């Protein structure tokens, strides 16, 4: 028994010694922790974390400018930015005779109407088929049904009386009849100078895409070229770029632009524009309205509101409807709806130099009973011209 107990004690001692050796070997394998690194005096101070308290600033003596070492031995010089240069004011070309100067551009696109009619009228025998072709030519040029019938009837009578028809006689005859159709006696002056007050007030209306804001800017150039001072009202507040675009046009000719916040009340902007125009003693206030889709009844009602609010200052002298000449008969639908909301006093036909059909001048005047006063003949800043019937008809029939 004592032998067994002794053996157990020896076994325990041996196991304990072995365990101590194993633990000791493991401890020897663990590396001691690295010594703390010396602080890097070149590193920027650590950013404070959320919750850290700022240290109390240390009191340090201030140095004078003489004690500060400058890289080049001189004091720093503040660089002043040059003041922003005001945009250069342009002097638009005179408007008198502008359509005559642009006649070549107009005739390139409109010549088909006049030349087509001259060719048909020059036939030896003017039978019914020929007269039907003349009617078709006029209708294709968007003259409209009733004006076409009137013109054909007058041409029939005059050709019958004339008898023989030389090219010169036909040209004179056609020119006279087209002038009668276009209307040589209509008052086409843009009313901007009322006798009893200043400024004259002009509203510019029309659907999106007709070039309405651009036309307003070009009209400002026309007025400045004629010696008038202009204030622009950017009442198209629904299109982000409209006010910027209008202001750019105004700055080029020295016209002041009144604008409001994007999406603001158009009537308020129009009201302020007239108020500032009065205070500045301007000759004319041009109000650019939003491009109303003629199918949106609520928006059209708002256009009527703009006019009513402006008239709290003074009567509106002109309401110019801008139409895209390339839309043809569709433009007449737009014209009809606008005329129901505001009293249109004049028409501006844009893009008359493109694929336009010159007869739209006749058709839209008949539809509204008001004259075409201005026509756009290109993308240039001075390509808006007062409408002159004689120059227009001469462009139609060519040289």
Image (cartoon, rainbow, N blue to C red):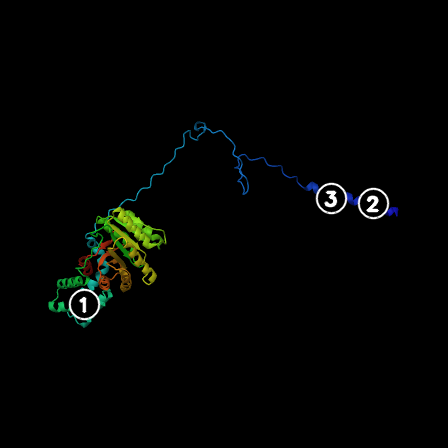
Q: Is residue 283 above or below residue 323?
A: above
* Residue labelled with disc 3: 22
Residue 225 x/y as whole percent: 22, 49
* 2 or 1: tag closer to the N-terminus: 2
Closest to the observer, 87 or 236: 236
Closest to the observer, 342 or 311: 311
Residue at the spot 33% in from the left edge and 60% down from the top edge: 299
* Residue labelled with disc 1: 150
* 1 or 3: tag closer to the N-terminus: 3
Residue 308 x/y as whole percent: 29, 57
Q: Secondary structure at mark 1?
A: helix
Q: Is residue 92 above or below residue 370?
A: above
Q: Is residue 188 above or below residue 256?
A: below
Residue at the spot 88% in from the left edge and 48% down from the top edge: 1
Q: Residue furthest right?
A: 1
Circle 3 Cα neighbour tier, 10 Å, few/some/many (<14 / 14–19 / ≥20): few
Front label number (1 vs 3): 1
* Residue labelled with disc 2: 9
Closest to the observer, 341 or 359: 341
Q: Does the rendering let one see residue 180?
A: yes
Circle 2 Cα neighbour tier, 10 Å, few/some/many (<14 / 14–19 / ≥20): few
Determine the CA span between mark 2 and mark 1: 139 Å
Determine the CA span between mark 1 and mark 3: 123 Å
Magenta highlight range:
18-23
Looking at the image, do the residues carrying marks 2 and 1 touch, with CB atoms under 8 Å apart?
A: no
Q: Secondary structure at mark 2?
A: helix
């Amino acid at each position: 028994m004592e032998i067994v107990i002794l053996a157990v004690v020896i076994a325990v001692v041996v196991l304990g010694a072995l365990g101590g050796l194993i633990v000791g070997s493991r401890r020897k394998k663990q590396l001691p922790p690295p010594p703390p690194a010396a602080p890097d005096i070149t590193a920027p101070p650590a950013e404070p974390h959320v919750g850290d308290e700022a240290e109390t600033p240390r009191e340090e003596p201030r140095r004078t400018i003489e004690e500060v070492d400058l890289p080049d031995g001189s004091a720093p010089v503040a660089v002043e930015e040059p003041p922003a240069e005001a945009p250069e004011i342009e002097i638009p070309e005179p408007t008198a005779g502008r359509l005559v100067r642009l006649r070549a551009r107009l005739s390139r696109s409109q010549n088909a109407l006049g030349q087509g009619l001259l060719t048909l009228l020059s036939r030896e025998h003017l039978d019914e088929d020929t007269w039907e072709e003349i009617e078709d030519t006029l209708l294709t040029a968007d003259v409209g049904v009733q004006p076409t019938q009137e013109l054909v009837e007058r041409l029939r009578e005059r050709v019958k009386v004339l008898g023989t028809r030389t090219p010169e006689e036909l040209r004179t005859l056609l020119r006279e009849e087209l002038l009668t159709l276009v209307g040589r006696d209509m008052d086409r002056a843009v009313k901007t100078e009322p006798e009893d007050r200043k400024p004259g007030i002009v509203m510019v209306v029309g659907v999106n895409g007709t070039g309405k804001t651009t036309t307003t800017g070009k009209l400002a150039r026309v007025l400045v070229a004629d010696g008038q001072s202009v204030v622009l009202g950017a009442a198209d507040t629904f299109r982000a770029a409209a006010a910027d675009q209008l202001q750019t046009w105004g700055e080029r000719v020295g016209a002041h632009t009144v604008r409001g916040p994007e999406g603001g009340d158009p009537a308020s902007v129009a009201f302020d524009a007239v108020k500032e125009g009065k205070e500045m003693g301007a000759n004319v206030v041009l109000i650019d309205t939003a491009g109303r889709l003629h199918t949106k009844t609520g928006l059209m009602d708002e256009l009527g509101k703009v006019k009513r609010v402006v008239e709290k200052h003074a009567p509106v002298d002109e309401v110019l409807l801008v139409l895209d000449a390339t839309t043809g008969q569709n433009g007449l639908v737009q014209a009809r709806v606008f005329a129901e909301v505001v009293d249109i006093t004049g028409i501006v036909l844009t893009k008359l130099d493109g694929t336009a059909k010159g007869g739209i001048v006749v058709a839209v005047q008949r539809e509204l009973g008001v004259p075409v006063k201005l026509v756009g003949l290109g993308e240039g800043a001075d390509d808006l011209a007062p409408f002159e019937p004689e120059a227009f008809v001469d462009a139609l029939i060519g040289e």
